Image (cartoon, rainbow, N blue to C red):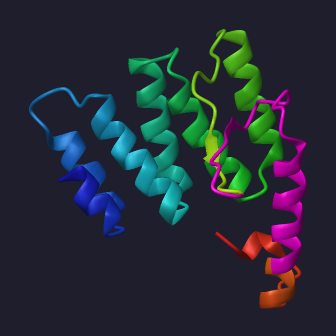
């Protein structure tokens, strides 16, 4: 229900529901609320959800990353830096970096966002070329508009 209310943008109602629960809300519930806050840019409720998540799972990187991404999307770089410092101080590491697959000549190589040693440099140049083609095709100069 919290996820449903959050998806509809009814963040205050979702928070009210959580606070009225007879059972203790778990990380899934608070995570659903924080995810919705990220989508709708609600910092006030998002901070409440994040604090609850940190109390429930202080070493779960996903809790930190959701908040960091929320800060980064709104150019709140000092908060990004602060959260990364908190992660470092608490010895929290991002366990599963993002992965991508790109099909080239019927071959689908997989590479992680943090993998600087991938043997196929061709992928990097192919992606750069694709980015350039997209910009030309759509006449987009500000790629921050593309999601």
Q: Say whether residue 141 is left or right of residue 76.
A: right
Nearest to the observer: residue 6 or residue 117: 117
Quadrant the C terminus occupies: bottom right
Nearest to the observer: residue 102 or residue 49: 102
Number of numbered discs:
0
Residue at left offset 38%, top offset 39% = 31
Does the magenta segment cover residue 117? yes
User: Which image quadrant for residue 118?
Assistant: top right
* Placement of 54 over or under 31, stated as above or below: above
Q: Say whether residue 70 is left or right of residue 49.
A: right
User: Which image quadrant for residue 142?
Assistant: bottom right
Nearest to the observer: residue 60 or residue 114: 114
List x then y, in percent, for residue 41: 55, 61
Which residues are drawn in magenta? 105-133
Q: Say whether residue 15 is left or right of residue 81.
A: left
Q: Say whether residue 104 is left or right of residue 43.
A: right
Nearest to the observer: residue 90 or residue 51: 90
* Placement of 137 over or under 96, stated as above or below: below
List x then y, in percent, for residue 22: 9, 32
List x then y, in percent, for residue 117: 85, 27
Residue at left offset 23%, top offset 41% = 19
* Placement of 79 over or under 123, stated as above or below: above
The extreme left residue here reads 22
Residue at left offset 38%, top offset 19% = 56
Residue at left offset 62%, top offset 24% = 94
């Amino acid at each position: 229900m919290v996820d449903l209310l959050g998806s509809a943008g009814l963040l205050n109602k979702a928070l009210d529901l959580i606070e009225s629960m007879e059972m203790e809300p778990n990380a899934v519930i608070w995570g659903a609320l924080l995810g919705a806050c990220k989508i709708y840019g609600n910092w006030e409720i998002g901070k409440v959800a994040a604090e609850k998540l940190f109390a429930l799972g202080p070493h779960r990187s996903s809790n930190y990353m959701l908040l960091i991404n929320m800060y980064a999307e709104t150019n709140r770089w000092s908060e990004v830096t602060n959260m990364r410092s908190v992660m470092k101080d608490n010895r929290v590491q991002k366990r599963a970096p993002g992965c991508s697959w790109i099909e080239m000549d019927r071959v689908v190589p997989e590479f992680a966002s943090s993998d600087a040693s991938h043997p196929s440099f061709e992928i990097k140049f192919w992606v750069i070329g694709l980015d350039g083609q997209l910009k030309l095709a759509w006449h987009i100069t500000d790629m921050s508009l593309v999601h």
